[in-house]
Image (tube, grey):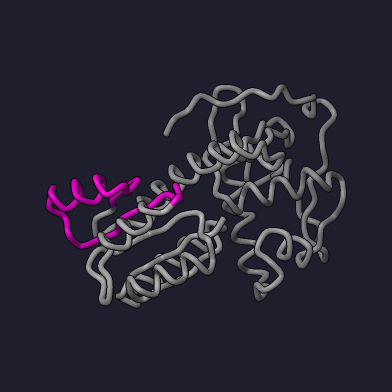
Amino acid sequence: MKILVAEDDQLTRRGLIEVLEAEGYETVEAADGAEALALFDETEPDVVCLDIMMPEVDGYEVCRRLRARPSEVPVIFISAKSEEIDKVVGLELGADDFLTKPFGIKEVVARIRAVTRRWMATRRTTEGSSDDEVFRVADLEVAPDELRARRGDEVVDLSLREIKILRLFHDHAGKALDRNTIFNACWGVDYLPSSRTLDQTISQLRKRIELDPSSPRIITTVHGVGYRYQPDPTTSKPVVLTRFRREG
């Protein structure tokens, strides 16, 4: 999933990109509105994050031109303009959400995940993508288009990258996957591998999906190689393809 980030402040732009890429999104960056419009046509992003006060063409005008096209790509305004009228104008122009600076990482992630869920649900309806089908990992039912997993009544929120990791282990159940295999599948072949990055990601994922993260049963370490998911026949029953109740 690709996100176009249009923001003239370099520090804010790079900060947003780091957060989004950590979540597993591909990013494209623009420093002004004119560049954003050109990159939109060139790269065909799935979501657009727009600052309002940009040189060349402001965010409002970028949104207006995008909505004049036969495209329903989600647009999120990210701006220092915090007056209610600014939000009203943005939403009336067709934006899907409005974030006010300064913002926290958790807020950005939550808003992006909400837009992602809507985007993936739309894709499932229009394209019937098999990538969105529910699958089981141990006692977890994972719903990619919800960015969530369920264990009984417990709902676990997941990032796009964590979904990719769980799908990879599901598709290669019982096999020890080396670090390069995991990086290539879940980060991309152009990503510069870092054992620390992978280990931290797996550690954070374990905290959410393992009953006892200090003694993992789902994603286990294979010393000198990487990681393995070994299905437990007592929990790996067939999945009933149902959808989770929408929560945002």
| Left or right position of 186 against 99 | right
Pick the quarter of the image with the N terminus: bottom right
Residue 70: x %, y % from top left: 45, 50
The quarter holding residue 146 reads top right
Which residue is painted at 60% across and 49% down in the image? 205
| Camera-side residue of 77 and 174 | 77
Asked whether residue 118 is drawn in magenta, I would say: no
Residue 37: x %, y % from top left: 40, 68
Number of marks in the image?
Answer: 0
Identify whether 239 is placed above or below 54: above
Residue 245: x %, y % from top left: 51, 24
| Camera-side residue of 237 and 62 | 62
Which residue is painted at 67% across and 50% down in the image? 164
| Left or right position of 223 against 5 | right
| Camera-side residue of 117 and 247 | 117
Identify whether 57 is placed above or below 112: below
Which residue is painted at 53% across and 38% down in the image? 122
The quarter holding residue 208 reads top right
Identify whether 128 is placed above or below 207: above
| Left or right position of 147 against 109 | right
Residue 154: x %, y % from top left: 54, 28
Instruction: Read off the magenta span.
Output: 70-98
| Left or right position of 51 against 81 | right
The quarter holding residue 145 reads top right
Pick the quarter of the image with the C terminus: top left
Which residue is painted at 80% across and 51% down in the image? 228
Identify whether 7 is placed above or below 231: below
